[in-house]
Structure formats: structure tokens, C-alpha cells
Amino acid sequence: MDDQSAIPESDPVALFDAWFAEAGTSEPNDPNAMALATATPDGNPSVRMVLLKGHGPEGFTFYTNAESRKGGEILANPRAALLFHWKSLRRQIRIEGSLHEVTAAQADEYFHSRPRVSQIGSAASDQSRPLPGRQTYLDRVEDIAREFPEGDIPRPSHWTGFTLVPQRMEFWLGRPNRLHDRRLFVRDESAAGDGWTSGLLYP
């Protein structure tokens, strides 16, 4: 039985990069898929799957309609949690922290990097709001396509992105007989630079 942790006591952002790169070669679909948990100011939680679209020392970035349910919760209570689960690797990462809206230039750049049909679909959607029938949405898609017959679609002002700045990062590695590995990193606000403290957790 191995009595040493397989999760190194290192920079958690660099460790995320390494695990994320491995997931990119092993996961058959959307290795950048993550569960995003938000909550209302009075503590009612909600969770959904979104796609990670950028990451680095500054945090973890995703894009959404700010007028959706998650957008409204983020604007009212700008803290969230992320969960990556890569089943083929028996690994997961939990990340918690504060959220900051990306700049308009960043939102424009990503919105216009998407396929034209995706731009149209986002512009036509009142995300999370009641829809009387699917044809209503399809009609709006066609209207926007006719209004802008070629080129990029203008980004709606409410379509934006958020970067989660991590305060806690927990790495989980599956092992036989449920003798799993868990290591928690917590940002040390008192340390100079970008310091982290870490320790193992019981599985």
C-alpha cells in the first residue's frame, strides 16, 4: 500500500494546468466542461454545466447571458464554485472564489470567435426565461439571420463573461478500495505575492 500522497504540494494553478492538459487527451467529450454553482443572496443554490473558456494565474473564465438565472445570481452574489470531474482519469478538482466580469473587449473577442450560428442563437435567446413554444425561438433566429445576412452578429450588451479568482482549490484522485487522495490548497492572503497553504484531507 502506497503511504505517500500522489498529489504534489505545489502551485495549485500549475497543477490544474497539468491535469487539464491530460484530460484534453483522454476525455472523449468536452474536457473543459465544469459544474458551476451559484447562489442567491439569501442562500438558495443552483448548479449547471458550463464550459471553461480561459484559465491562468488570474482565474477561470466562462461566458454567459447576464440576464439568465445564473447571470442574475452572479450579479447579486458574485461568489461561486466550480467542479471538474474527469471520470476516465478518476480525478476531480473543486474551485471556490469570487467572480469578476470580463471587459467588453474580452467579451467581444470571444463572442466573435464563435461560429456565426452560435452567435445568432445567443443573440436570439432570452436565456432562462419562459418560452411559449420552440417555434418562437426559431423565428427569432431567422429574423436575426435576415437582419445580418453576413459577417459577425453584434454582441448583445448582456452577453458577457466572468472570471472566478480562486481562493480554495481541492484536488481529488481516486484510488483502489476508496483510499482516495485529497489535497486542499487555500490562498494565503497574508503571504507576499501569490502564496498558498495546503494540506491533505481524509477521503
Image (cartoon, rainbow, N blue to C red):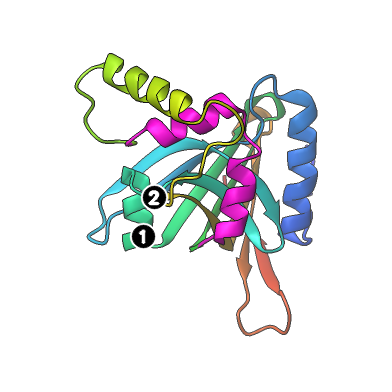
Nearer-N-terminus badge (1/2) = 2
Q: Determine the residue positioned at 58% across, 63% down.
A: 165
Nearest to the eye among marks 1 and 2: give it. Answer: 2
Q: Determine the residue positioned at 42% across, 29% down.
A: 144
Q: Is residue 126 visible?
A: yes
SS label for mark 2: loop
Examine the rendered structure and indicate whether residue 108 appears above or below residue 149: below
> Which portion, as a residue range, is magenta?
101-126
Distance, label 1 to label 2, CA atoms, is: 8 Å
Dominant secondary-structure state across the stretch colored magenta: helix
* Residue 104, image x, y percentages: 55, 59
Mark 2 neighbour density, 10 Å: few (under 14) some (14–19) many (20 or more): many
* Residue 20, image x, y percentages: 73, 40
Q: Which residue is mark 2?
A: 66
Examine the rendered structure and indicate whether residue 29 appears above or below residue 1: above
Q: Determine the residue positioned at 54% across, 24% down.
A: 117
* Residue 79, image x, y percentages: 43, 61
Q: Is residue 7 visible?
A: no
* Residue 169, image x, y percentages: 61, 56
Residues under numbered marks 1 and 2 in contact, where contact means CB atoms less than 8 Å apart:
yes
Inspect the magenta stretch and tell me whether residue 166 lies in it: no
* Disc number for residue 75: 1
Three-letter residue code for mark 2: Ala
